[in-house]
Image: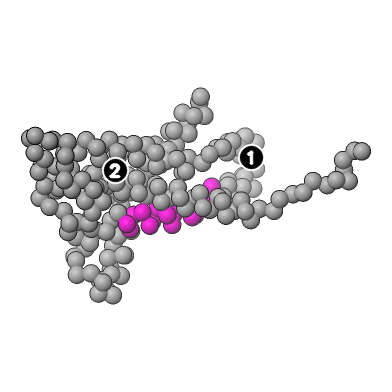
């Protein structure tokens, strides 16, 4: 039970880190893309409009690329280096590896939160007779900035994009990349065949 709670806490912590990165540091990922697009004359948008329009695909691509990085192996290598430099610290027991890495399921909490927000959102253009029908729901959460209408833009549009949609796409892309990396590394591992001579007849 404790391992399950710890595993869920790790997933929520990863979501928190991605949400903070989306709100505070998204310009680190989107500004180079805008500079390249502007230099190659692929866009006529200014930086703010470009970021608001293409934040979601850029953030998803960043999540996929980060999912390909083996952070677990890098952390293990740094831990081995630390233990070789400071042998006294090597007496501590190393933590058990998770049976399923949290990065593969960290998308689940934010996806549930996104679905709740996606279903409960109501457009300004919703009629009194049918309040559950909100036209432009998909465009609001996934469409580019220039496709947004006055009924879709409100004071919560930015938070919906940066706290729900962006982190969800980032973590899903990261999980897909990590799963591909795990599958590829598992295929490359040599399988040890049992030595039949050691078996007793």
Viewer-nearest of discs 2 and 1: 2
Tell me the crowding category of disc 1: few under 14, some 14 to 19, or many 20 or more residues within 10 angstroms, Cα based: some
C-alpha gap between disc 2 and disc 1: 41 Å
Label whose residue precedes the other's in the sequence (2 or 1): 1
Image coordinates of residue 136 in percent, x first then y, are 18, 48
Which residue, given by chain and number where applicable, does mark 2 sit on? Answer: 164
Type of colouring: one colour
Which residue, given by chain and number where applicable, does mark 1 sit on? Answer: 90
Q: Is residue 104 above or below residue 187?
A: above
Image coordinates of residue 125 in percent, x first then y, are 9, 43
Position of 125 compared to 51: left or right?
A: left
Q: Furthest-left residue in view?
A: 128
Tell me the crowding category of disc 2: few under 14, some 14 to 19, or many 20 or more residues within 10 angstroms, Cα based: many
Residue drawn at point x = 62 percent, y = 45 percent:
83
Give the quarter of the figure containing the C terminus: top right
66 inside magenta stretch: yes
Q: Which residues are magenta?
A: 57-72
Residue 158 visible in this rendered orientation of the protein? no
* Type of secondary structure dominating the magenta stretch: helix
Q: In terms of depth relative to the viewer, which is nearer, 177 or 1?
A: 177
Position of 66 compared to 93: left or right?
A: left
User: Residue 65 sits in which quadrant?
Assistant: bottom left
Q: In terms of depth relative to the viewer, which is nearer, 77 or 175?
A: 175
């Amino acid at each position: 039970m404790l391992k399950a709670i710890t595993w869920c806490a790790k997933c929520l912590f990863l979501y928190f880190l991605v949400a903070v990165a989306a709100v505070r540091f998204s310009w680190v990922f989107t500004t180079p893309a805008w500079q390249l697009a502007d230099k190659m004359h692929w866009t006529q948008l200014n930086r703010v409009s470009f970021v608001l329009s293409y934040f979601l695909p850029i953030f998803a691509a960043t999540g996929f690329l980060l999912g390909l990085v083996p952070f677990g192996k890098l952390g293990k290598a740094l831990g081995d280096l630390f233990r070789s430099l400071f042998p006294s610290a090597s007496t501590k027991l190393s933590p058990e590896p998770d049976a399923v890495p949290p990065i593969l399921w960290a998308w689940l909490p934010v996806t549930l939160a996104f679905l709740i927000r996606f279903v409960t959102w109501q457009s300004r253009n919703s009629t009194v007779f049918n309040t559950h029908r909100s036209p432009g729901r998909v465009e609001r959460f996934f469409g580019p900035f220039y496709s947004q209408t006055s009924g879709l833009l409100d004071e919560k549009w930015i938070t919906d994009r940066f706290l729900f949609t962006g982190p969800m796409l980032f973590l899903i892309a990261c999980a897909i990349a990590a799963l591909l990396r795990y599958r590829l590394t598992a295929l490359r591992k040599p399988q040890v065949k049992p030595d039949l001579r050691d078996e007793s007849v």
